[in-house]
Amino acid sequence: MSPASWTFAETYVVEDDVLLAARARAEEVGAVAVGSGVGATLRFLAAVLDARAVVEIGTGAGVSGLWLLRGMRPDGVLTTVDVEAEHQRLARETFKDEGIAPQRVRTIAGRALDVLPRLTDGHYDLVFADGDKREYGAYLAEALRLLRPGGVVAFDNALWHDRVADPSIRDDETVAIRSLTQEITATDGLVPLLLPVGDGLLLAKKEWVPEADA
């Protein structure tokens, strides 16, 4: 694919003023927001899943959260987790600008691996991870517990600036993401997909598996 075609695809769904303002807030505090291609994909996933309950790991300034909310059911609730309380304050400004009812968003400040174990098993339609890349494997384990059958987990930065595809690159973050891609394809009951949008979006659908006979 040519750079021109990639750019055309990435910007096919145009961001409006609310998203652009959220992106500007993210830049001010050094939070790296998802690109419009990933955002549009997240909205599409939430819409296809008719998502009522979504978990987001990495709130940022609300760019990805807003994309998710736009795809979710009108009564859907987004639970978003971030270690930076200031980022979440900015995200709440974004959601307010959009006119999102406060009860539709739960912002939880803290480490994802401290927060996720407190969430309800099998309750969520979609889990989106954009947190510490070294913890992606642990996020997968939590996501599989949290998702209902048919739910989807999505990981941002799955190509990690072209580093994952180069086996000679062995830093901790790259190795963790590379290991995640391998684990997902090797796990029974998951339908994997790696999309070359943004910096790579790795998806896995949790299939329904009948319980073994007693």
Image (cartoon, rainbow, N blue to C red):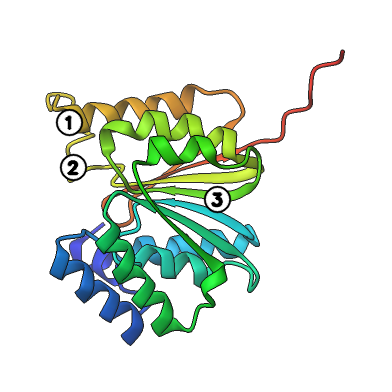
Label 3 – label 2 distance at C-alpha: 26 Å
Residue 9 visible here: no
Mark 3 or mark 1: whose residue is earlier in sequence: 3
Position in image of residue 193 (x %, y %) = 46, 42
CA–CA distance in space, label 3 to label 1:
29 Å
Where is mark 1, residue-wise?
166
Disc 1 secondary structure class? loop
**Which residue is label 3 attached to?**
126
Position above or below: 109 against 104: above
Query: Could you say which is closer to the camera, residue 181 or residue 128?
Result: 128
Marks 1 and 2: in contact by CB < 8 Å?
yes
> Tag 3, which secondary structure?
strand
Residue under circle 2? 162
The amino acid at mark 2 is Asp
Of all residues, the one furthest to the right in this rendering is: 214
Place of residue 65 in the rendered image (x, y in percent of width and height, measured from the top left): 42, 64
Amino acid type shown at disc 3: Leu
Nearer-the-camera pick, 168 or 96: 96
Dividing the image into 4 quarters, which one contains the N terminus?
Answer: bottom left
